[in-house]
Image (cartoon, helix red, strand yellow):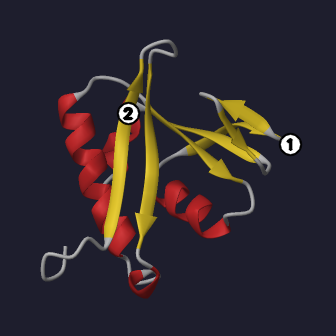
Amino acid sequence: MLDKEIISCACIRYYEEEDKYFLINVNTRKDFQNKGIATKFLTNVLKDFFNKVNDNLYLWVNSENKIAIKLYAKLGFQKTDYFPDKLSFKNNLLNNDIYFCNKKLFSNKSIN
């Protein structure tokens, strides 16, 4: 937050039917992008998550979102699956090619 304005946000949600935690709704205000803010913010989010939860963390990312893919790779997420067509997940239609990524619990050591 800057002067009590939200500049970056993210959510971690547990999907009971999948028995998995997902990083969702990651956003940084456009005027604060490419300044390392999302990296620092998500590093803290991930540290907090792995300190409290003994489980892996997953996410979906649009295959055309090269900036997000680079960020997630820097944070230790690995692409595990690729879906080349539209995909329906939790009643939401994802319109582009999608990567499914996983950050394993033991890879937490790479977070600074």
The quarter of the rendered structure image containing the N terminus is bottom left
Q: Which residue is mark 2?
A: 13
Residue appearing at x 38%, y 26% in the figure:
14
CA neighbours of label 2 inside 10 A, class few (<14), some (14 to 19), many (20+): some
Q: Is residue 75 visible?
A: no
**Which callout, 2 or 1, points to the residue nearer the camera?**
2
Camera-nearest residue between 54 and 8:
8
Residue appearing at x 60%, y 69% in the figure:
67
| Percent of width and height locating residue 49 | 26, 38
Q: Which residue is mark 1?
A: 84
What's the CA distance linking mark 2 and mark 1?
Answer: 25 Å
Q: Quadrant of residue 33?
A: bottom left
Which element is circle 2 on?
Answer: strand
Camera-nearest residue between 35 and 1:
1
Camera-nearest residue between 29 and 21:
29
Residue type beneath disc 2: Arg
| Percent of width and height locating residue 44 | 24, 55
Q: Is residue 97 above or below residue 33?
A: above
| Label at residue 17 | none
- The residue most toward the left is 3
